[in-house]
């Protein structure tokens, strides 16, 4: 609260204790400011709750990558006999052991975040905050006591939560989302994943990889917003490695049968016919909604998009109220990626309290989809490049390749593929890089710097490859898609 002299409690109040919010708070504290963080996790409809750290730490990137790793290990165990390891097949997987190990790691991160805030003298409030006015938020503590907090500057970093299809009968009662899957004590068993997002594909991918019967139901195109050629190859790989797909289908009803299984009814848009199937678990992965509804933003005068309910900001992350800012997934028109929220938050705080004028650059942001065969990309998709520059001004270089590790193991490499989207006019500036294969994130991160620095095709071709690696394939691209030739098949010494 403000005292009679008009003094506010804090220099900076951060609403939301996820990756972006914590980065803001710690940065401001290091710059000598008085800082508070408020964070509250509304339990999922299934009752799942978690600690400090936000989506990425608790129900996103971290547990997702660990369960993806569990699935990759299953594949390596299958490879092992080819390399001389006497491993009795098949090797059973224990969901309980994996889940407990992953959950314990996440809990250690929750604790670590609390300790870091304490060490930096950032005040942490585990309360559900809402605005009272443009400088003040209110929350109710565990004992029922109301707490009022005021600050000169406020940063909203509340992120988003999974969308539920509430129009579908039984969706809320019987379905789960990514808010729940990583915290299940028991195996989800035979699972239907509804959606075509990267969340849907990643979850279905690791569920298939640990040996569960998994089906993806997609109403429309997969990985919307990503390069569609790469997207189709991701799907091909998943389909050929055990994930079932129901394309052009939309669920209409979920019912629990007497034996506890879930009966799902759906309509096939191509035939117009209705069909049903039974599953142990139904996972909704149909998108996310910003966590703004309970903030009372109108009390502070903060404008949101009428379509998405996301907060509208300018290039300085400022909302319609000059001293209230927003970063991360809660913001309209920003990539929903943890490192984006962290960097945008740090730069914002450096501008507020550190005398900086550096703005966040949202171009050429690298990312990776952790499907069984990973898809890494940075820059424009082929579709975006053509839309922006015209077909006649775009050149695409590409190649299939075979990772050396796949040779002895006899693995199928037909979807291992790399392509570089360039401007056609010399020196052929690289507009986008797309990599499908093992360790795609590591490969993409390395090339992201070059593309951020304005690399040309000629410069990439003059980069010496590290032999024999998958990333070497990027610097060997010679054949253009415009030529109409088949993609090359490169490999060791190829």
Image: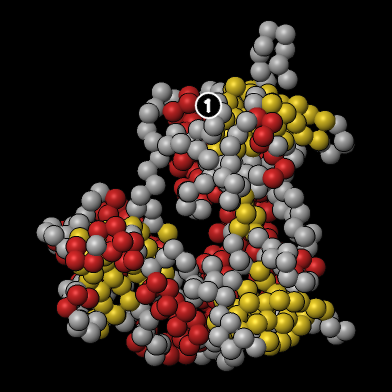
Taking the view exactly as shown, the residue that stands out farthest to the front is 272
Mark 1, residue position: 322
Given residues 303 and 429, the one toward you in this image is 303
The percent position of residue 198, horizontal first and vertical second, equals 52, 67
Question: Dot 1: within a 10 Å radius of its alpha carbon, few (fewer than 14), some, or many (20 or more) residues?
Answer: few
Specify whether residue 280 is in view: no
| Residue found at x 77% / y 60% | 45
The percent position of residue 137, horizontal first and vertical second, equals 71, 30
Quarter-wise, where is residue 269 in the image? bottom right
Quarter-wise, where is residue 3 in the image? top right
Specify whether residue 220 is in view: yes
| Residue found at x 22% / y 71% | 397
* Lateral position of residue 70 relative to residue 448, left or right: right
**Under tag 1, what secondary structure?**
loop
Given residues 267 and 239, the one toward you in this image is 267
Quarter-wise, where is residue 482 in the image? bottom left
| Residue found at x 40% / y 87% | 411
């Amino acid at each position: 609260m403000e005292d009679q002299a008009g003094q506010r409690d804090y220099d900076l109040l951060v609403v939301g204790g996820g990756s972006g919010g914590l980065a803001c708070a710690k940065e401001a504290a290091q710059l000598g400011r008085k800082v508070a963080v408020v964070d509250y996790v509304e339990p999922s409809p299934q009752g799942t709750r978690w600690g400090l750290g936000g989506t990425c730490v608790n129900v996103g990137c971290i547990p997702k990558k660990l369960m993806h790793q569990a699935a990759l290990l299953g594949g390596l165990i299958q490879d092992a006999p080819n390399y001389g390891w006497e491993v009795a097949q098949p090797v059973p997987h224990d969901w309980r052991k994996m889940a407990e190990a992953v959950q314990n790691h996440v809990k250690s991160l929750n604790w670590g975040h609390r300790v870091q805030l304490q060490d930096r003298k950032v005040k942490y409030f585990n309360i559900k905050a809402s605005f009272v006015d443009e400088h003040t938020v209110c929350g109710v503590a565990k004992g029922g006591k109301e707490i009022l907090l005021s600050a000169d500057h406020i940063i909203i970093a509340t992120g988003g939560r999974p969308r539920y299809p509430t129009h579908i009968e039984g969706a809320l009662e019987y379905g789960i989302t990514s808010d729940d899957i990583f915290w299940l004590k028991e195996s989800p068993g035979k699972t239907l994943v509804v959606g075509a997002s990267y969340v849907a594909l990643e979850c279905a991918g690791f569920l298939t990889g640990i040996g569960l019967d998994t089906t993806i139901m997609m109403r429309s195109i997969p990985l919307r917003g990503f390069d569609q050629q790469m997207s189709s190859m991701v799907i091909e790989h998943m389909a050929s490695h055990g994930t079932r797909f129901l394309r052009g289908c939309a669920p209409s009803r979920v019912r629990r049968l007497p034996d506890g299984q879930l009966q799902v009814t759906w309509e096939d848009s191509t035939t117009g016919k209705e069909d049903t199937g039974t599953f142990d678990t139904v996972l909704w992965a149909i998108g996310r909604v910003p966590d703004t509804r309970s903030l009372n933003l109108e009390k502070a005068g903060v404008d949101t998009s009428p379509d998405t309910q996301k907060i509208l900001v300018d290039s300085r992350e400022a909302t319609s109220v000059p001293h209230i800012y927003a970063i991360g997934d809660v913001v309209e028109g920003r990539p929903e990626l943890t490192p984006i929220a962290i960097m945008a938050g740090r730069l914002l705080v450096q501008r507020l309290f550190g005398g900086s004028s550096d703005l966040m650059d949202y171009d050429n942001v690298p990312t990776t989809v952790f499907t069984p065969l990973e898809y890494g990309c940075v820059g424009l998709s082929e579709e975006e490049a053509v839309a922006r520059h015209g077909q006649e001004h775009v050149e695409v270089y590409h190649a299939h390749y075979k990772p050396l590790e796949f040779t002895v193991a006899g693995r199928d490499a037909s979807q291992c593929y790399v392509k570089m989207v360039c401007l056609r006019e010399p020196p052929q500036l690289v507009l986008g890089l797309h990599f499908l294969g093992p360790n795609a994130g590591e490969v993409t991160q390395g090339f992201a710097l070059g593309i951020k620095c304005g690399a040309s095709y000629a410069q990439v071709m003059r980069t010496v490859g590290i032999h024999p690696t998958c990333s070497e394939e990027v610097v060997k691209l010679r054949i253009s898609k415009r030529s109409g030739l088949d993609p090359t098949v490169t490999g060791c010494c190829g």
